Image (tube, rainbow, N blue to C red):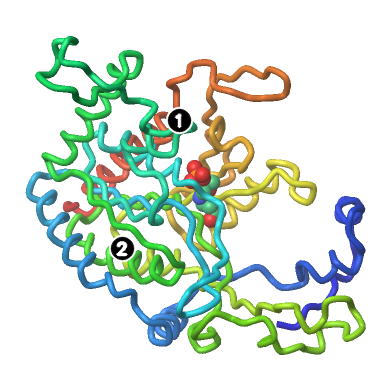
Amino acid sequence: CPITPPPTMSASSSSLTAAHSAQDYANAIDRSVPSFTAAQEPDEKSYFNTNLPPPELEEYSERTEQFVRHHYHHQRRVVLITSGGTTVPLENQTVRFIDNFSAGTRGATSAEYFLEAGYAVIFLHRQFSLLPYSRHYSHSTNCFLDFLSEAQPTDGYAKKSAVMAKGEYSDTMLSVLRKYNHAKRENLLLLLPFTTINSYLFLLRALAMKMEPMGSKALFYLAAAVSDFFIPRERMSEHKIQSGDFNETQLVDPAASGVGKKLIIDLDPVPKFLKRLVESWAPKGMIVSFKANSLGQLETDEGILLKKCRLALERYSHHLVIGNLLQTRKFEVVLVDSVDPQKQPRRLTLQRDEANGVKFATKQDMEIEEQIVTEVVRRHGARIWDVVATTGSL
Ligand code: PAZ
């Protein structure tokens, strides 16, 4: 896409470029492009007709249908949590891809609190990102083997040598294990992995439609970091892009160093399907989205984050936006709701200490997701009552 330099540069943006040339900055982001609008029905048709569904679509849809049916009969609420980053492959036989920032902590941690609150959880997550329960051990700075020790027959635990949790970890591990086994035994947690932005979009649409029988008892908690840009199927290279394959375009200064070896990637905006989710895929469910901002030089203050949260509510007409800054997301979030988006947002924070500029929770085992989920569950309950009171059914 042709890139035109922005008409003017602000003081903060020019300071950003101190380490780079003004030319680099001007070419990096086209700020004259209007911000994305919500996708409409024709955009949906166009996207889903021109991009291929992932192979797992049918299997996941069936499993979701059964899961929803089961919990409908048990009169449970069901939450679909999206979690982790979405990749943008550069090739069909993918060797290289662009990724989005997210470890899956928000999603995996929240899933545990939703399960504790009595929800059944569909966990649509980026493959190999954090999972509920195993997250306590899988991506820890310790290798998981560091949590274990060898029990000797003389310890009285085993007749022959065996593996056991080290004493200092065993109480916590037992508690996590019990919760995990309970979720498995009661079929409360459906784990569905994806990798690409395309799979994510196909799956979100299909699974949302499968949640239809839940009515207002369906909750969508969209914590995944969804890519804003992608390469449409018709423009994607089939095999690994070789150096030398690149077309030079008029965008490249033919005299610049490295020309002929540069790879220029032309990305389209990913359609913003949130409004389709609200209006068509899951019109009765409650929809909560997250909005992330970075505390960078261009977007320093949280005023921008609040503005973006309000804009998202206005644009997509869903129920709640939870704003967070990447640098402080484990300690504070703001909740902006659709009832009165202009009113003072609800702020949730963890008590924290600051030592040497490092922020950490005062109580090691406190997690902000506990507060977020409590608040979301409360609002979901209130909404279900409203729906029942006004329509006479769920
Ligand atoms: O997964 P994580 O805990 O590392 O990060 C969570 C998060 C920042 C991706 C999430 O809270 C969020 O804001 N998701 C939406 C991101 C977006 O604006 O697309």
Query: In terms of secondary structure, where does tag 2 sit?
Result: loop
Tell me where residue 167 sits by quadrant: top left
Q: Is residue 154 above or below residue 279?
A: above
Quarter of the image containing the N terminus? bottom right
Q: Residue at x 92, y 64 (%)?
A: 22
10 Å neighbourhood of mark 2: few (<14), some, or many (≥20)?
A: many
Can I make out residue 216 in this image?
A: yes
Q: Is residue 268 above or below residue 80?
A: below
Q: Residue at x 67, y 25 (%)?
A: 358
Query: In terms of secondary structure, where does tag 1 sit?
Result: loop
Image side of residue 320 versus residue 269, left or right: left
Marks 2 and 1, Cα distance to the nearest angstrom? 41 Å
Q: Which residue is mark 2?
A: 282
Extreme residue toward the left, this view: 73
Q: Residue at x 45, y 48 (%)?
A: 320
Image side of residue 324 versus residue 211, left or right: right
Tell me where residue 169 sits by quadrant: top left
Amino acid at dot 2 = Ala
Q: Position of residue 81 (x, y in %)?
A: 35, 50
Number of numbered discs present?
Answer: 2
Q: Is residue 67 above or below residue 164?
A: below
Q: Nearer the viewer, residue 348 or 102?
A: 102
Q: Residue at x 40, y 44 (%)?
A: 130
Can I make out residue 337 in this image?
A: no
Image side of residue 19 versus residue 233, left or right: right
Q: Position of residue 107 (x, y in %)?
A: 40, 44
10 Å neighbourhood of mark 1: few (<14), some, or many (≥20)?
A: few
Q: Nearer the viewer, residue 218 or 89?
A: 89
Q: Which residue is mark 1?
A: 142
Mark 2 vs ligand 1: CB under 8 Å?
A: no
